[in-house]
Image (cartoon, rainbow, N blue to C red):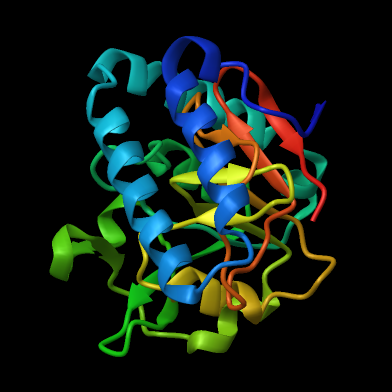
Amino acid sequence: MHEAGPDAGNAAAGGSLAAGAGGSLAAGAGGSLARVRAEKAALRRELLRARGRIPADRRAAAARLLREEVLSLPEAQMAGTVAAYYSVGTEPDTRGLVYALWKHGAYVILPLLRADGDLDWASYEGPGSMAEAPRGLLEPREPPRGPGAVARADFVIVPALAVDGRGMRLGRGGGGFDRALARVGPNVPVVALLHDGELLDRLPAEPHDRPVRMAALPSRGVVRLRP
């Protein structure tokens, strides 16, 4: 386990990204909401481009490392209910992790994207329980449990494009996971899964943004953050 700090992978894979973020984000911290949103949008584009350059074999290796790191956490091992997500595209792959948590006896719930951008939740019952959904997503076929189901989770796994040392998380901009995290109790462990180079010094934040307690990276394992 590690304490929070800039991702060591930045030096090799994303040094310019971290350096650029550190200056402009600090300058924009007291600026207008429009400026913060513009900074977020620019950072999302840069991070997505960087993810697109990661070779498939490296992404597969990273998925295995992240799976083992998360499964080794006492919080994950003791959790009766786990709220997670089913990865798509260049996100750190969670499909093996979700399957392993389910096989180990956890009750796993995955999000269903609602028309209003909020997240409902349904249970994962193995790979065969997943179906294609809008926006290229895969979602459980099981009955919806309601947006409040995430509040009953003992352990929460969320996607992120980047996280900073305060635990602030940069998502894709839809706001669904921020709404979900607002329903999670303050003492429930929340971990974001990242590629190397995506733990940054400081991210722009808005009032609705919700921090996470941990970030998992392939080269560093699970990093405890300081919300």
* Residue 68 relative to residue 38: left or right: right
Q: Which residue is drawn at 63% across and 45% down?
A: 202
Q: Is residue 166 above or below residue 63?
A: below
User: Total of numbered circles in the picture?
Assistant: 0
- Residue 106 in percent (x, y) is at 63, 56
Q: In this view, does 60 lie to the left or right of 98?
A: left
Task: From the viewer's side, name the closer residue of 203 and 80.
Answer: 203
Which residue is at the far top? Answer: 12
Q: Where is residue 112 in the image (x, y as percent from the top left)?
A: 35, 75
Q: Quadrant of residue 219?
A: top right
Residue 218's quadrant in the figure? top right
Residue 5 visible at all: yes
Quadrant that contains the C terminus? bottom right
Residue 197 vs residue 23, the one in the foreground:
23
- Which residue is at a point 43% across and 42% down the rendered structure image? 94
Q: Quadrant of the N terminus?
A: top right
Percent x, y of residue 167: 69, 51
For the point 38% across and 37% down, the residue is 93
Q: Does residue 203 appear in this view?
A: no
Position of 44 relative to 180 (above/below): above
User: Looking at the image, which residue is at 59% across and 34% down?
Assistant: 199
Give the side of residue 72 with respect to residue 131, left or right: right
